[in-house]
Image (cartoon, helix red, strand yellow):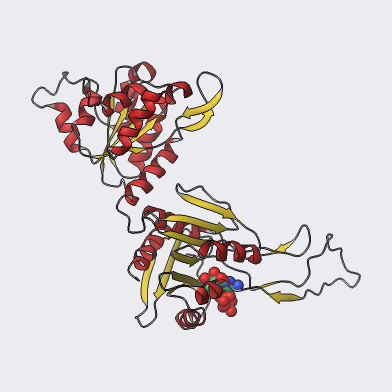
Amino acid sequence: MFKGKNVLVMVTGSIAAYKATTLVRLLIKSGAQVRVGMTTSAQEFITSKTLSILSGQDVLTDLFIGHTSQVIHIEWARWADVIFVVPATANIIGKIANGIADDAVSATIIASSADKVIAPAMNDVMFHNPAVERNLEILKQDGWLVVEPVVGYLAEGYEASGRLPEPIDILQQADIRLRAKKGQLIGKKVVITAGGTKEALDPVRYLTNRSSGKMGYALARAAVEKGAEVKLVTTIDRENIFGVEKIIVSSTQEMFDVATHEFTDADIFIGAAAVSDFKPAKLAEHKIKKQADGGLQLTLVQNPDILKTIGFSKKDHQIVVGFAAETKEVIAYGTDKLVKKHADMLITNDVSNSDTGFSSDDNAVTILVPDQLPEALPKTTKIEIARAIITRIITLK
Ligand code: CTP
């Protein structure tokens, strides 16, 4: 989202001003051109020198110093594709909401038509002051993306809401929400399964597989980036993704129960989990002890097929997508599964290749859709593959 973009970071006078340094570094790392503006009170908390060195640019602090040949705030306002106000005080929130432009930061913001993100950080009583709440509401109506403060330890020495989220979380949320603004999945519910299911043998052991859940998480992110409401039914608790509700499950039966329930009012189902086809016929009540003859015979029974059940229950408006992890004859087996499971799309991948297999960050897949030629997506990151799959799903109906 920020790669190649001109991003203006406006820092105001909150104790959290130091976190702007991390935000600037993360933005530069993600490929953005970054400039920084600071209010006078921000400079009480952190020096402009620090941010100037980090951004490699002069920091905007005053409307009337230097740059005599240009109207500096207009030039900066036009340059910006995105403006972050991080951290934002009650004062700057009040000024922007009411059109007051009496310093370099507020004047530049008001002169710009860039996408705008604001992350308030202040004492909890200030944050809940009716005037601040009213001003934030105005900003939301004006199209600002407000990153809400989190509950945490405040400078005053107690836990309350008002704390600035970590810069990485501000960036992730802004990235997802700015993309989602124009998303074709706004108002749609997407249910995704991820990870390998675990089939308990006894209270301490289970049967599972090598799935990392990464592809399912990437699909969840790609779907929220298009504005969807996403329920991720997963056996693996990986990173939090803004807008994705994780429902942690363990066995196939649990995943089946949650996924089929969530699918009833969903628009899209994507089965990215590596589901165990079998489970032990009986769950031992106590830990299984070594056997006298040195071996152990296990009887396994078949698990329900989540994708197939959902494929055969779908209504006309619902789209069902499956995956097929194969080690040989990938397209042939994939096509067979597409038909047998009544899916609208099947994504095949060759898990014999360690470059693109289970725990890898990369993948290479082929998209199969009934009556259409297979479409190969060459090797790239799982998030790029996921974005391409979601874009393709959107074209189905
Ligand atoms: N799947 C499922 N429930 C199962 C088995 C598989 O929902 N009990 C889903 C997977 O999430 C995937 C697709 O079906 O989207 C194909 O999974 P895969 O393991 O490749 O196929 P199987 O149906 O198990 O067939 P086989 O193991 O015989 O190749």
The one nearer the camera, 232 or 319, is 319
Residue in the image at 81% along x and 75% along y: 297
Q: Nearer the viewer, residue 99 or 131?
A: 131
Farthest-out residue, right: 292
Q: Nearer the viewer, residue 316 or 6?
A: 316
Residue 176 place in picture, x, y as percent: 38, 48
Q: Dividing the picture into quarters, in which one does residue 371 lie?
A: bottom left
Determine whether, in the image, residue 370 is placed left or right of residue 285.
left
- Asked whether residue 167 appears in the rendered view, the answer is yes
Q: Is residue 259 above or below residue 123?
A: below
Quadrant of the rendered image containing residue 37: top left
The residue under the point 43% across, 64% down is 267
Residue 5 falls in image quadrant = top left
Q: How many marks?
A: 0
Quadrant where the C terminus is found in the figure: bottom left
The image shows residue 198, relative to residue 127, as above or below, that is below
At 89% from the left and 73% from the top, the residue drawn is 293
**Residue found farthest to the left:** 69
Residue 89, how many percent across, how many down?
36, 24
Left or right: residue 88 compared with residue 252: left
Give the percent coordinates (x, y) of residue 389: 39, 65
Ligand 1 shows up in the quarter that is bottom right
Can residue 144 be seen in the rendering of this structure?
no
Q: Which of 96 and 157 is in front in this view?
A: 96
